[in-house]
Image (cartoon, rainbow, N blue to C red):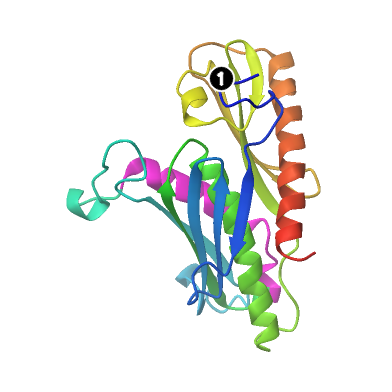
Amino acid sequence: MRNDGRNYDELRPVKIITGYIIHPEGSVLIEMGNTKVICNASVEEGVPPFKKLSGEGWVTAEYSMLPRATNTRNKRDISKGKQNARGVEIQRLIGRSLRQAVDFKLLGERTITVDCDVIQADGGTRTASVTGGFAALYLACEKLVKDGIIEKSPIVNFVSAVSVGIVGGKACLDLCYEEDSRAEVDMNVVMTDKGEFIELQGTGENNTFSMDELNELLKLAKAGNEQLNKIQRQVLGL
């Protein structure tokens, strides 16, 4: 048993509330344990210059953490005069991940921006952002169909993400901050609902790890993402 009473292969309690913000085309609040992220998907006509006249759309993401999402207050990026490097890295991960969910030709020359704002952090903010961000993206695409803007939803894959790691010599699923901060190995795994990998981010923080340990972590991540996919489908009424 872990500090919070979970088994090593157990997700934290997951809750996804749709329509959390009324203005975006798609919006959810995702809670994974004590981590809470608001994910809003906004649709705009037009695409970046490199996509113009291609007949294809684009999906991108932005990520930020509210100043008091953690134990101590973080300064806003604007007060520092530059964007937080960690935030840039995470939002690129989210964008890369969510682009694998969409057929750009079906979307047409439109851009969907998924904003992920962490209001409370307890580990796994990037994986929660991907999982919740996909739900918001799905809802935005459904609205485009409902409004008659496009004929068919461009969603071709469900996408989710989960963290895994080796903590105290044991492979564990969905690390909270306390576990993440002392993990020997930490990994984030993004997958489709077809069981295909989109991205693996794995690091030996305090120790090296073997091929057998890597395979054990990937097996845990696959099972975790399958559970998250089921939750996404239930929430979206599928």
- Count how many numbered circles sit on residues in the image: 1
Query: In the image shown, does 91 or 124 lie closer to the viewer?
Result: 124
Res. 98 visible in picture: no
Q: Position of residue 73 (x, y in %)?
A: 26, 42
Q: Quadrant of the N terminus?
A: top right
Does the magenta-highlighted stretch encompass residue 104? yes
Q: Residue at x 53, y 72 (%)?
A: 111
Residue 98 in the image: above or below residue 168: below
In the image, is 232 to the left or to the right of 118? right
In the image, is 121 to the left or to the right of 70? right
Residue 36 in the image: above or below residue 174: below
Q: Residue at x 77, y 51 (%)?
A: 230
Does the magenta-highlighted stretch encompass residue 129? no
Q: Which residue is mark 1?
A: 185
Q: Position of residue 199 (x, y in %)?
A: 63, 40
Residue at the far bottom in the pictured view: 148
Query: Which SS class for mark 1?
Result: strand
Residue 227 in the image: above or below residue 235: above
Quarter-of-image position of residue 217: top right
Crowd rating for badge 1 (residues with CA inside 10 Å; few <14, some 14–19, many 20+):
many
Quarter-of-image position of residue 175: top right
Q: Residue at x 69, y 84 (%)?
A: 146
The stretch of residues the image draws in magenta is 84-106
Residue 72 in the image: above or below residue 47: above
Magenta-highlighted stretch: main secondary structure? helix
Q: Residue at x 55, y 75 (%)?
A: 25
The amino acid type of the residue labelled 1 equals Val
Res. 86 visible in picture: yes
Quarter-of-image position of residue 181: top left
Q: Position of residue 102 (x, y in %)?
A: 68, 64
